[in-house]
Structures are given as C-alpha cells and as structure tokens.
Amino acid sequence: MLWVPEGKNDVMTMNLDPWEVIYIFDASLNEAVAALRFWTMDALEFGHKNKAKEITVVEWYDKTDVTYYIDNADMIFHLDLSKGTEGSQPHLFTGVPIIPFPNNGLEFAEPQKVVTLIDGYDTIMSATVSEIEQFRLAYMFAKGAGLFVDDVFIKKMEQTGVFPLPGDGEIGFINKELAMDGIKIILDEIRRNIYLFGKSIDTSKDNDGDIRVIGWQVALLKLENSAVVTERKFKKALREQYRMLTDYWTKFQGVTIDPMSIEFTFTRNFPKDIQAEAETLLLLLDGVSRDTAYSQMSFIDDPEAEIKKVELEQSPFREGALGGDQEPDNQQSTST
C-alpha cells in the first residue's frame, strides 16, 4: 500500500496481509477499480477498564479517494468522521494505491495445492504410530491352562517365572499385524506427489554429492519455472507501483522519472555449468552470429551490450591500448 503521511510531502509503503484486502476488478479490463482493507481491534469502553469490544475498521480505496468506516462492535458500520468532515479524503495517487503482488495466476501459494496430500500424510503417520503404541495393550493367551488361571496360579507364576502347562500348551500374545510395506509404499507415493504438485524438490534425498550440475538443473526445473511466473507477476506489480510513485513525484515534487526505464533484477542461486556453456559458446561462434551465440549463454544478460564490450576491448584505439599516454606515430600533439 502507498500512503502519504499527514503533513509530509513524502510517500511511504507498507505490506498488508492479503487476507485483510478485497479487490474489486473491472471484468472487461481485469483492472482493479477499488480495494477494501479491513482489520479488527479491541476498543475499551469508557469507565470499564477490563471490558473491551472487538470492532472492525474499514478503508475503502478507489482511484481518487479513501473513505473510512468503523462498526459499533455489532457489525453496523458508519463513517469514521475522525478522518475528515465527511469520513473521506484524497489519497493523492493516480490509481488504487493498494497493489497486489500475486504468486501466480491462481493467486495462492504453491503449498496450497498439496494441503490435502500433506493432511493425508500426517493422518497415515499418526494412525501408524497409534497402532504401534497399542502393541503394549495386546492380550496374552495361555493355551492349555484351562480354567485354572486364578490368583494362586498367577502368584506362583510371578514367583517362579514358569507357566505350568500340559504338553500341547502354548503361551503367546494376540495382536494386529501391520502391513508396513504397504504403508511405506503409500507414504512414499504421497510424499513424491507433494513435491511434484508443489513444484518443489525433496532436499532430504542424499545424492552422495555425485550429482552433476545438469542433474541439479533438472531437479530444480519445476521450482525455477514457478519462480519465473512469480517474477513476471512481481514485475507487473512493481511497474504499477512505480507508475503511481513517479506520477506523485512529478505532480507534487517536480521530479520527472520514466517508470518504464526502471529495471527490476531478480537473482536466484540456480546452478550453472559455466565450463560446458563456455565450450558451447566457442562452437557456436564458428557457425552462427555472435548475437545468437551470446544469447544462448545463461551468464550473459544482454548479448548486444556484451558484443560492444568485446569490440571495445579489441579496439586498438581504446584507452590504454597503446600503453600509458603514448600516441600513434602518425599523430602529433599540438598545443595552443
């Protein structure tokens, strides 16, 4: 959210919790025409120090003004006249000053897609642990003891540690056999789907340090694709934010800045095989243009700028190319 503090010619920014904001979009343009921000707070009644009511505060933003509302703790709202004679005032920006930064087109976090899978994994783990704990409650059976298991029988057994049974007698426990192999298969499959649909990687896997760079790139590809989508969404939001900022600076501070000239850089620690790319570059330079060859390299962001740098370094007339302050033999220094 962009806002101007009272009495200051300056712009402040503040991150808002997304669950406290509701957007109203123009369906034909997919553009926010208004935004509603709300939150709750405890209000103490006069004369009752220990008695507090929860009230809801609402701010309604359109493209020019912000209007303030407050409820009476019973969800009956009225204008908050403490914010102005009409409960409204201009926010001084050329648009709705609450800018959404969506993670993706669905506007929710990646883990949200796999919440049910995580719940299922937890349920199976909890149920399995409970079954294992119940083993201590298993019943003992004494085959052949007949009806002679009484207090005297148990007392002798405790003293001697021997079960007096006939030749075909047997001692054992009645318990439930767990199909651990089946449980492990189900848990492994759920775990795999959690990372698959969540577009993440299972960092608990031990690769013994034997995985090559290309292997890490393949493993991180789903996460990288998700990050690329988020990057595009964030760039769009940042451009809208700086559009309103530069409009404010131009109107109230006399500073003109083109928001489209601002570049946003997102850096991720994605593993790169620089040696393999360098070898590929040498091969490409023999068959394609330098611009095409450079554009295939992950460590070159701007091929045209890189070409100019190389040409400048190779130019015999660049600064220092002839050594110190020497001048070409065919040129003479003149002074006036």
Image: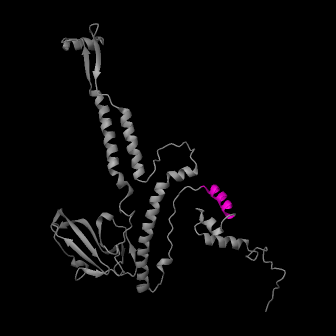
Q: Quadrant of the N terminus?
A: bottom left
Percent coordinates x, y for residue 213 in the rendering: 57, 51
Colouring scheme, one of rainbow, by chain, secondary structure, one colour: one colour
Q: Quadrant of residue 336?
A: bottom right
In-image side of 264 versus 126 (left or right): right
What main secondary structure does the magenta stretch of the protein show?
helix
Residue at the outermost front position: 287
In-image side of 148 versus 227 (left or right): left
Viewer-closest of 27 and 52: 27
- Magenta span contains residue 281: yes
Say which residue appears at 40% left-offset and 78% top-offset. Answer: 244
Percent coordinates x, y for residue 206 in the rendering: 51, 42
Q: How many circles with numbers are drawn on the protein?
A: 0
Viewer-closest of 290 and 211: 290
Q: Is residue 131 above or below residue 322?
A: above
Q: Is residue 20 above or below residue 130?
A: below
Residue at the outermost top position: 167
Q: Is residue 241 above or below residue 220?
A: below
Percent coordinates x, y for residue 25 in the rendering: 31, 73
Say which residue appears at 78% left-offset and 77% top-offset. Answer: 325
Say which residue appears at 61% left-offset and 69% top-offset. Answer: 303
Q: The magenta stretch spans which residues?
A: 273-285
Q: Quadrant of residue 17?
A: bottom left
Percent coordinates x, y for residue 90 in the rendering: 31, 82
Say which residue appears at 30% left-offset and 68% top-offset. Answer: 21
In-image side of 303 versus 328 (left or right): left
Residue at the outermost right position: 329
- Magenta span contains residue 46: no
Q: Is residue 254 above or below residue 73?
A: below
Residue at the outermost bottom position: 336
